[in-house]
């Protein structure tokens, strides 16, 4: 089919949905690590209890403390990656900071 048969209209209707899904996915990349850091328990005993409730596996407090450190590192790395990716997109789009040297 060619564009006169309505094919082009069908393609343009799908574009806004793809764009919306892409934006939601990008938003989730920012929100998920931030929420995880915000609700992360501060004491290893709470982490051990949450692991036991969720999986039925008991872990020691030392293991729970290590798990907490790893989870914090993963969340910070995910936020850093999302930030670096956003800056790379911004720099690649041709936007430049205004020159303020006079």
Image: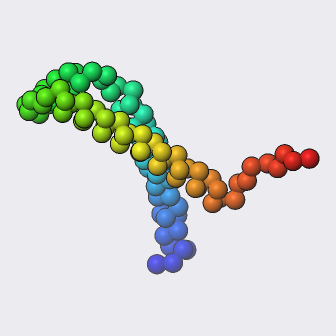
The residue that appears at 45% across and 42% down in the rendered structure is 79
Q: Can residue 10 be seen from the camera position used here?
A: yes
The residue that appears at 69% across and 59% down in the rendered structure is 94
Residue 39: image x %, image y %? 34, 25
Pick out the residue farthest to the front.
62
Q: Can residue 20 be seen from the camera position used here?
A: no
Left or right: 34 in relation to 43: right
Image position of 43 with respect to 32: above or below:
above
Foreground residue among 93 and 42: 42
Pick out the residue farthest to the right.
102
Left or right: 41 in relation to 102: left
Residue 78: image x %, image y %? 41, 45
Residue 101: image x %, image y %? 87, 47
The residue that appears at 46% across and 78% down in the rendered structure is 1
Foreground residue among 90 and 51: 51
Image position of 99 with respect to 2: above or below:
above
- Snapshot quadrant of residue 60: top left
Q: How is the image coloured?
A: rainbow
Pick out the residue farthest to the bottom.
1
- Snapshot quadrant of residue 64: top left
- Snapshot quadrant of residue 58: top left
Foreground residue among 70 and 33: 70
Image position of 9 with respect to 87: above or below:
below
How many numbered marks does the figure carry? Answer: 0
The residue that appears at 8% across and 33% down in the rendered structure is 57
Residue 80: image x %, image y %? 48, 45
Left or right: 9 in relation to 29: right
């Amino acid at each position: 089919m060619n564009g006169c048969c309505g094919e082009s209209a069908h393609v343009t209707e799908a574009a806004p949905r793809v764009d919306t899904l892409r934006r939601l996915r990008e938003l989730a990349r920012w929100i998920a690590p931030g929420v995880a850091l915000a609700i992360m328990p501060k004491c290893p005993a709470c982490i051990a209890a949450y692991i036991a409730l969720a999986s039925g596996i008991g872990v020691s407090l030392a293991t729970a403390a290590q798990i907490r450190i790893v989870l914090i590192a993963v969340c910070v790395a995910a936020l850093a990656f999302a930030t670096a990716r956003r800056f790379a997109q911004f720099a690649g789009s041709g936007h430049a900071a205004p020159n303020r040297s006079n």
